[in-house]
Image (cartoon, rainbow, N blue to C red):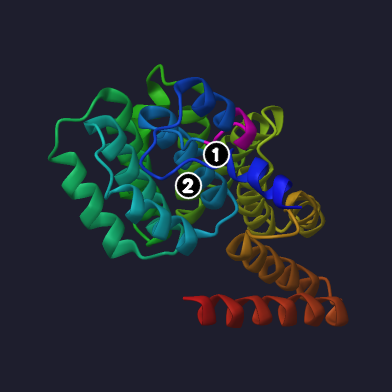
Amino acid sequence: LLGSLDRASAFSLPADVPIPLRANRRLANMRGPSRQRPQGSARVKRLFDGLDALTRTERFESAMRGLNRILRLDLDVQSRTRVQLSRAECYLGLRRLDQVRELIATLEQAELGPKELVHCALINAHRLAVSGQAREAFRTVRPILQGSAADEIKARAEWVAGLSLYRTGHYSWASQLLKRSAAYYRLNKLPEKLAAVLNNLGLVMKSRGRIDAALDCLDEAVSLLPPYGCQMTRLRLQTSRGICFLKLGQIQRARTCLLEAKTLATSANDQL
């Protein structure tokens, strides 16, 4: 036993004796590969991808907290502009329209590239459309429709223009623009945005007296939503469906939809 102890102690070195380099390498291999945090542009890109997913599913409060944390990083000008545009989108989703207006006004005073300027114009036009300034919203978005913008930008412009024309009573033109926008989102498999456009298209159909067509749009939109998130779109869809069922005299189905909308509205207010 004493001999075993002596042999074991022979392998233990005093604290002041350095371990040879080869032994250091062997110890590192025994620990396994270390997980390094992504740095620089790769890290920022991964953060943006995660926040885009939150914004897409309308979890705006969580996205805002993440965006505020990203602003503390040492960002380049382009990344910082992207953060501010994403914050404006979140404020728009939360219908905090004064904050949208202030943020867009600040961004427009900076030196932005053409793509960022168009994005600012789209957000501002959307703000105007949902705040009752439909004519001004259409004037803002019209140059984008007439220009040679990318497909995704044009689809957003058609959406905002269709919403603006709906609110000014031009239902036929609004329907055409919203259908073109919906076609882009359907083709590119963007279900959350497609659901929001179909909600607006359903409202146009309802206003034209085509209740069955309106319900077709609204039912498709509901089926597109994921099981989580998209609370505000779900709330608007159930409200619109309830009104359509009420117009058809289907009181029980209207009641079910409107009660669900009330529950969603209460939950949204609690979260805000």
Give the camera-side residue of 242 and 168: 242
**Residue type for callout 1:** Trp
Residue 20 horizontal/vertical position (percent):
45, 25
Nearer the N terminus, badge 2 or badge 1? 2
- Using the numbered discs, state the Cα–Cα distance from disc 2 to disc 1 in whole angstroms: 7 Å
Give the camera-side residue of 6 and 161: 6
Residue with the mark numbered 2: 165
Q: Which residue is drawn at 59% across and 83% down?
A: 266
Residue 40 horizontal/vertical position (percent):
35, 30
Q: Residue at x 57, y 32 (%)?
A: 27
Whether residue 134 is visible, yes or no, is no
Please give left or right for residue 38 compared with residue 266 in the image: left
Residue 159 horizontal/vertical position (percent):
52, 41
Residue with the mark numbered 1: 173
Residue range in magenta is: 29-35
Q: Which residue extends farthest top?
A: 148
Q: Is mark 1 on a helix, strand or loop?
A: helix
Please give left or right for residue 124 compared with residue 45 in the image: left
Residue 91 horizontal/vertical position (percent):
38, 59
**Residue type for callout 2:** Leu
Q: What element carries label 2?
A: helix
Asked if labels 1 and 2 touch by Cβ distance under 8 angstroms, the answer is yes
Q: Which residue is drawn at 67% across and 71% down?
A: 239
Please give left or right for residue 143 compared with residue 217 in the image: left
Q: Residues within 10 Å of mark 1 (few under 14, many from 20)?
A: few
Q: Relative to residue 123, is residue 62 depicted above or below?
A: below
Whether residue 6 is visible, yes or no, is yes
Q: Toward which corner of the image does residue 66 lie, by quadrant?
A: bottom left
Q: Relative to residue 177, is residue 205 depicted above or below?
A: below
Q: Does the magenta stretch include residue 100?
A: no
